[in-house]
């Protein structure tokens, strides 16, 4: 596991995981409306490209899309398939705020949290071969379950929280990724404060926040990791 060195249960090969991610992503894009806002779409792709480069994973087929949807959410599926929802942009506000979100989401994929969750989940009881056959046939239930397990969350109407360990790892690694990409890690603190404000204003948290640990816990942890991330930060 990057950064923490934690051992993971991974029954999928990275190639299997990537293929599942691609299948899930294609299904989501078929059902979604891509944003027609050229400025916002370009921002997502510009910031995403820098985060992707910071990972060093040139073997990933990176793709960044902005989906027209009021939910405040984002995800990265295995293999580098990323989506941001337009409802998140008022909270991210600028490139650095978006980099904090994308760093976090990309970190889940780099750390193979989706594959870990599939390995631990119900799919293991069914068998990976049976799951892959169901996916190849575009069985709706299998696609939905795998998509949710891999991390797309609210997209498929099934919110599955990452474990607190996985969330902390994504925060930690995401902070380093945004710093390497040339974004000030302090922007992650500002983002989570805005998330907390958005949660207060609406009476319920944004989707991106609802599956995560409390913002107070997260802010304290991020403050502790910033000194580690700052040496990677060189403004562009």
Image (spheres, rainbow, N blue to C red):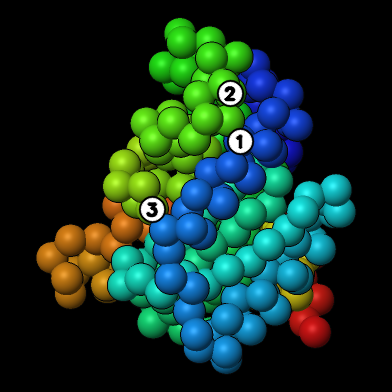
Mark 1 against mark 2, which lies toward the viewer?
2
Residue 36 lies, with reference to residue 4, above or below; the image says below
Residue occupied by mark 2: 132
x 30%, y 52%: residue? 210
x 81%, y 63%: residue? 53
Residue occupied by mark 3: 155
Q: Kindly indicate the quadrant of the structure image that contains residue 62.
A: bottom right
On-image quarter of the N terminus: top right
x 64%, y 16%: residue? 11
Spatial CA distance of label 3 from label 2 is 21 Å
How crowded pointer 2 is (Cα within 10 Å; few <14, some 14-19, many 20+) is rated as some
Residue 175: horizontal and vertical position, in percent?
63, 59
Residue 22: horizontal and vertical position, in percent?
63, 45
Name the foreground residue: 8 vs 77.
Answer: 77
Residue occupied by mark 1: 20
Q: Is residue 16 visible?
A: yes
Spatial CA distance of label 1 from label 2 is 8 Å
* Tally of marks: 3
Residue 108 lies, with reference to residue 192, above or below; the image says above
At mark 3, the secondary structure is helix
Residue 195 lies, with reference to residue 159, above or below; the image says below
At mark 1, the secondary structure is helix
Name the foreground residue: 49 vs 142.
Answer: 142
Mark 3 in CB contact with mark 2 (< 8 angstroms) = no
- Left or right of residue 64, residue 67 in this image: left
């Amino acid at each position: 596991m990057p950064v923490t060195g934690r051992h993971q249960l991974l029954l999928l090969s990275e190639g299997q995981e990537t293929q599942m991610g691609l299948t899930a992503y294609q299904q989501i894009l078929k059902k979604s409306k891509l944003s027609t806002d050229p400025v916002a779409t370009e921002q997502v792709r510009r910031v995403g490209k820098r985060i992707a480069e910071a990972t060093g994973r040139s073997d990933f087929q990176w793709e960044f899309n902005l989906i027209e949807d009021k939910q405040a959410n984002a995800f990265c599926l295995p293999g580098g398939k990323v989506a941001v929802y337009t409802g998140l942009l008022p909270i991210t506000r600028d490139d650095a705020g978006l980099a904090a979100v994308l760093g976090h989401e990309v970190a889940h994929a780099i750390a193979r949290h989706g594959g870990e969750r599939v390995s631990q989940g119900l799919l293991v009881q069914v068998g990976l071969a049976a799951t892959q056959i169901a996916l190849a046939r575009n069985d709706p239930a299998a696609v939905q379950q795998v998509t949710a397990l891999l991390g797309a969350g609210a997209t498929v109407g099934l919110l599955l929280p990452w474990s607190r360990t996985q969330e902390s790892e994504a925060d930690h690694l995401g902070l380093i990724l945004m710093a390497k990409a040339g974004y000030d890690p302090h922007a992650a603190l500002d983002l989570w404060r805005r998330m907390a404000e958005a949660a207060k204003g609406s009476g319920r948290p944004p989707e991106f926040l609802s599956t995560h640990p409390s913002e107070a816990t997260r802010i304290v942890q991020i403050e502790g990791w910033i000194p580690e991330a700052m040496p990677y930060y060189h403004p562009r």
